[in-house]
Image: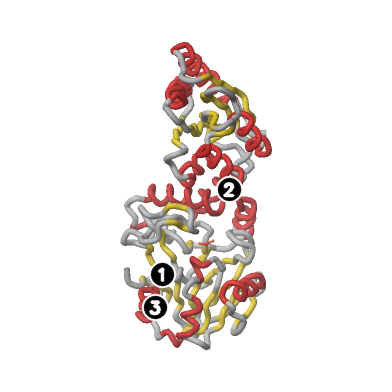
Amino acid sequence: MPAVEIKPDIYWIGVNDRTTDLFEGFWPISRDGVSYNSYLIKDKENAIIDLSKAIKTDIFFDHIAEVIDISQINYVIINHMEPDHTGVLRTLRKLAPDLTILCTEKAKTMLKDFYAITTNIEVIRDGQCLSLGRKELKFFETPFVHWPETMVTFETSQNILFSCDAFGGYGALRGTIFDDQCNDLDFYIKESLRYYVNIVAKFSRPTLNAIEKLKRVPVEIIAPAHGLIWRKQPGLIVELYKKWAGYATGEAEKGVTLIYGSMYGNTEMMMNSVALGLSHGGIPVDIFDAARTHPSYILPSLWTKSAVVIGAPTYEVGLFPPVAQILEMAALKRVINKKAAMFGSFGWSGGALRAIKNIIEPLKWDLADIFEFQGGPTLKDLKKGHEFGVEFAKKVLSFKKS
Ligand code: FEO
């Protein structure tokens, strides 16, 4: 994709990444990719807002060269230091050695730690403005959205908020960079939720603080560092982020995330009976085989649904490892206050239940129902599993988050 003019003299100069397999070295993006959106403002003085990961660097520098000579860059604004937005910084400084980096005090320290950069840095204060000539930029600190040094940049002539990670999402850009030209908004909303829960959710309180802080800023376009630019419906992505951040402590959607693992199919047989019971009980169910589904795809359900059913066999007097892994990830991401139930098979001794309790008790999950059985389930066990599902669905439907 070539550089795209968003408004007069304001350009998208980002990079579409469809070759990185794992975002942050962990989260799968091999199917749909991600974009690193960077922006160039051409004025008496020229500024670039956020950069790109050090990938496809020729494309990134070609984008700049489509608009101005690289040596004419006066400022690079680092909203956020994570290398998906700063990876090309050292190379850029070699090409434009006189440019000044604008960033927060914390980012200045990180510039030294990550890149050994200590010169040509100007620290900005919260609320400070910078005139480029005809255009003006205003900076707002938004700590922990996503790292402590983060800020956002507001362009005052066109009312564009360059929000970096905030309001971003996975998914490489599919031809257009704008929400109003996108024919599959549902895809980007789904990938924005996955991105939010994988990357930002632990910082939901700071996210809500940032939204509150910016609510009087007259934003007309939201230009994040990942995913679509929201120029038709900027309020949509803000409201979605607000809703998702609210799930950290508030009421989630009535529904069940059923996570299971099975060594020889016994717990899986029971899972089908329990799922049938949950459905007959009138509650929506998302089902995930923990051994075959990356946590990246399970976490959005865990985050947005009010209840969890864990189906896991005992494994070496403990919890089946793939299920343990997703529960530990839920703990890391602070998925708290869920209604929960557990079922599973054991061979000669239990152990899974104790391990589950150890993980979920600090998360304040209310373990309402437990159903363990030995070896393969009998027909009677399966009927019991169905009833277990029906009864738990009733509890979920009446559950109020405290
Ligand atoms: Fe897109 Fe926190 O980096």
Q: Amino acid at mark 1?
A: Ile
Q: How is the image coloured?
A: secondary structure
Q: Residue at x 59, y 66 (%)?
A: 151
Q: Select label 1 or label 2 by which is in front.
A: 1
Distance (Cα) linking label 3 and label 2: 36 Å
Q: Which mark is residue 357?
A: none
Distance (Cα) linking label 3 and label 1: 11 Å
Asked which quadrant contains residue 351, the reply is top right
Disc 3 packing (10 Å; few <14; some 14–19; many ≥20): some
Q: Amino acid at mark 2?
A: Ala
Work out whether 135 lies above or below 201: below
Q: Which residue corresponds to mark 3?
A: 61
Q: Secondary structure at mark 3?
A: helix
Q: Residue at x 44, y 80 (%)?
A: 42
Place of residue 263 in the rendered image (x, y in percent of width and height, measured from the top left): 45, 31
- The earlier-in-sequence mark between 1 and 2 is 1
Nearest the viewer among 129 and 33 is 33
Place of residue 85 in the rendered image (x, y in percent of width and height, measured from the top left): 50, 68
Q: Is residue 91 visible?
A: yes
Q: Residue at x 64, y 30 (%)?
A: 354
- The earlier-in-sequence mark between 3 and 2 is 3
Q: Which residue corresponds to mark 1?
A: 55
Distance (Cα) linking label 1 and label 2: 31 Å
Q: Select label 3 or label 2 by which is in front.
A: 3
Q: Amino acid at mark 3?
A: Phe
- The earlier-in-sequence mark between 3 and 1 is 1
Quadrant in which the C terminus is drawn: top right
Work out whether 17 lies above or below 354: below
Q: Secondary structure at mark 2?
A: helix
Disc 1 packing (10 Å; few <14; some 14–19; many ≥20): some
Q: Which residue corresponds to mark 2?
A: 245
Dot 3 and dot 2 residues touching (CB under 8 Å): no
